Image: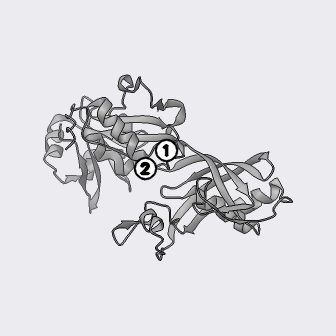
Amino acid sequence: MGRRTKDSGRDGVLILDKPAGITSHDVVARCRRVFGQARAGHSGTLDPDATGVMLVGFGQGTKLLPYLTALGKTYTAEVVLGTETSTLDDSGDVVATYDMAGITLEQVRQAAGRFVGPILQLPPMVSAVRVAGKRLHQYEREGIAVERTPRPVTVYRYDVFDQVAPGVFSVEVHCSSGTYVRTLAADVGTALGGGAHLRTLRRTAVGPFTHAEAAPLDDDLGGRPMLSLREALRGRAMAVVDADTVALIRNGRVLADEVFGDAVSDTAWGVCGPDEVLVGMYERFRGGESKPAVVITR
């Protein structure tokens, strides 16, 4: 049995720049070892070959991960026309080829535009979506066909910039959480009367957290500063309450909306004490009252 990691007691969120060639699970495992923190998790899987922004929560920061996971994502990638693969990206086997040499940049832009807005998307068989308690990629490895249900997602932008090589187009996608960019690449190929796959996928932002502030996964990782719990809720409404209210929040009390002033909204908001340290998150409950969605216990 492996030796258990002793919990360092650190609470926060780290913005990381995931390199290619390792899984998101591997990233979290390394963070646990480096920071001596047993309780850690991430806010959204990146494929092993993909790079870019990952948010890793530690200690009490793991309680915020569902809210960070739900943030929109921005990606850059390249769409390769004329070739379909088993995984919809360049890690898979070629399953079909098409002559698409005559496709222009404007045609690709028009095809991409058809997938902007609310759409239904079928999760690829290589995804981590669970069906009957098992992930789709596990069924795929076993050669088992599984019926999948299309899921609603939103593509806010699907920009096609230029042709970087014959039949290869650079793109940027801003989309809701749960959107498969590799599927969007394949969709463009189909819309143009052929096929396509994705390559060089990079996540450049998770909500307001961008690659410009992401720390590399290198030997200096242990010295990288974490975001505080309050900082991790960047862009979300925040209420500041007095010490007596903090005590009620730590006991999980339902409170009147008026306690939180202008922070009350249709989505959960953060609550800080007079020292501006996060003590929890609240959400609307019933007429004029709100209930705790997250309580920070230390």
Q: Of the residues shown, which amino acid type is indicated by label 2?
A: Gly
Front residue of 104 and 21:
21
Whether the residues at callouts 2 and 1 have beta carbons within 8 Å, the answer is: yes
Farthest residue, direction right:
102
- Residue 287, picture quadrant: bottom left
Position of 69 with respect to 96 (left or right) is left
Residue at disc 1, secondary structure = strand
Position of 41 with respect to 189 (left or right) is left
**Label for residue 206?**
1
Please give the name of the residue rendered at 41% of the width and 23% of the height, measured from the top-left corner. Answer: 220
Residue at numbered disc 2: 44
Q: How far apart are the alpha carbons under marks 2 and 1? A: 9 Å
Front residue of 135 and 97:
97
Q: Residues within 10 Å of mark 2 (few under 14, many from 20)?
A: many
Q: Quadrant of the N terminus?
A: top left
Q: Of the residues shown, which amino acid type is indicated by label 1?
A: Val
Position of 268 with respect to 19 (left or right) is left
Residue 291 at least partly seen: yes
Q: Residues within 10 Å of mark 1 (few under 14, many from 20)?
A: many
Residue 110 image position (x, y, % from top left): 76, 60
Residue at disc 2, secondary structure = loop
Between disc 2 and disc 1, whose residue precedes? 2
Residue 249 image position (x, y, % from top left): 18, 45
Is 98 rendered above or below residue 296? below
Residue 11 image position (x, y, % from top left): 27, 34
